[in-house]
Image (spheres, grey):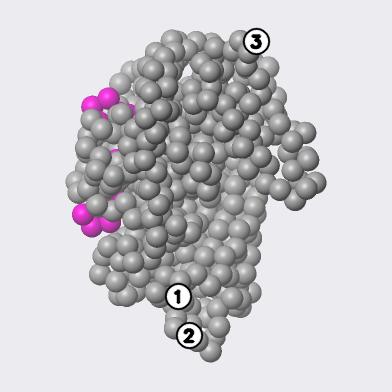
Amino acid sequence: MDYLIGIDVGTTSTKAVLYNTDGEIFGYANKLYPLIQDNPDMAEEDPDVIFDASVEALKEVTAKADPKEGKILGVSWSTQQHSLVGMDKDYKPTTRAITWADNRSEKVASKMAADGSGLELYKRTGLPTHPMGVVYKLLWIKEQHPDTYKKTQYWVGLKEYLLYRYFGQLKEETNMASTTGLFNIHTMDWDEESMKLTGITRDQLPELVDTTYQMKGLHPEIAKEIGFSADTPFIMGGTDGALSEIGLGAINKGEVAVTIGTSGAVRTFVDKPQIDPKGRIYCYPVMQGKWIIGGPVNNGGIVFRWVRDNLFAPEKAQAKKEGKDPYDLLTEIASKVPAGSDGLIFHPFLGGERAPIWDGNARASYFGLTRQHNRSHMVRAALEGIVYNLYTVELALKEAMEPTAILAAGGFARSPLWRQMLADIFEEPVTIPEAFESGCLGAMVIAQISLGLADDLSVVKKFIGKMNTYKPNPETFENYREIMPIYIRLGRKLQTEYDSIAEYQRKRAPKE
């Protein structure tokens, strides 16, 4: 019995899962790290802290492998998208990791959205016009931090930086490259116009390779610390979005994956590039014959965390004291409120928003508060607002394809309340696979293909196991059917003031 490791480098933690080649789990590790947010638009991380977290995660699961049973055949990667790390001529960081959630290039993106150049860039690259994009981060750095821009020799993403630390090589797979806005999805190469726009050159970017490419030549001292052979290949893998889709088993046409972790997304695979004329959904290549289209949202579980920390701090402290999960307590409180929260609506845009409105200045709000509402209504409305927003993403996606099934995963999938809420708001059956950590599982599947253990993605079906389906409740979805149009109309009206309130907040925010 040999082993494979899937590792998922997320926004707030790195997780690693040790599998045997039959997909059975033998070890799990989760290493946390902070998101650095010195002002409302900043969202950075220390790439070296994340490197250490990845080493610790790999070390922990490797210790669970029995060398008498077999060896570790490879490590495969799932990593957060849209990150940017600058490196100088000696390959030392010139920036921290600027994450997908960083909004400081909002004015650059807004200007390009207004003059139409953002839409043209989208048509070449599949990247919607939003400050999450690396291309917009580069333009912001060039304008606001020219010294950093000038001394930076290489521009890479977080995974590319980590792999450099492991191997001393700069390589990037095309799935991750396509999320930057610097990659042309039609030529399958770095985009000449985007490079010209940002002023960078091809030799400042990593070498492009396939999703199944194996990196070899691991630094011996790192291999020794982790506890496996320096000959162990690291398979490039892909983005967390694409690999979560694979890990969910949503690999066929019409199968839609909905995930809610720290952020969230609605996405599906198609067999060729599909560009939305309105620029509302992304389009990225994953591997031969597989393209992913969909819409990510900034505001998933991070909204629930905000509610927990700011509206229910006493309950959080009491739950901790009693050894209980505060999230379970909050969902129990929310379950006592009727669907629709008695007319209380929450737009969950605490960190700007990506799909479907692509507005970095979007702000959260409660609407419809009366004296009859209390904190119980506020927590339920927040949970509903997250799902309302995901539903509006699916509405945009339906214009490009017809869903045949909805599969869901993420931290929210542990909650029966959220599972039922998703089915009721979408008015469609929702299937929840019992498979553990879909991003890691998707990475493991890529490793199987890379190492010749599987022919294609269909192998994932035998690893997923039991599936639970939640059907819409007619007594509940009638409430949502009535309130959803209000949510959508209200959002359009609020969007006219997002720029104004965001500018007001920036004037009073701490300076960098």
Q: Secondary structure at mark 3?
A: loop
The tag earlier along the polypeptide, 1 or 3, is: 1
The tag earlier along the polypeptide, 2 or 3, is: 2
* Location of the C terminus (image quadrant): top right
| Mark 1 nearby-residue class (10 Å; few <14, some 14–19, many ≥20) | many
The tag earlier along the polypeptide, 1 or 2, is: 1
Name the residue tied to disc 2: 70
Image location (x, y in percent) of residue 146: 55, 33
Name the residue tied to disc 1: 20
Asked if residue 104 lies left or right of residue 447, the reply is right
Question: Seen from this angle, which residue lies furthest bottom?
Answer: 68
Image location (x, y in percent) of residue 222: 59, 72
Q: Amino acid at mark 2?
A: Gly
Measured along the vertical axis of the image, is residue 389 above or below residue 44?
above
Q: Nearer the viewer, residue 437 or 205?
A: 437
Magenta region, residue range? 276-289
Q: Are marks 1 and 2 in contact (CB under 8 Å)?
A: yes
Q: Nearer the viewer, residue 412 or 491?
A: 412
Image location (x, y in percent) of residue 6: 47, 64
Q: Amino acid at mark 1?
A: Asn
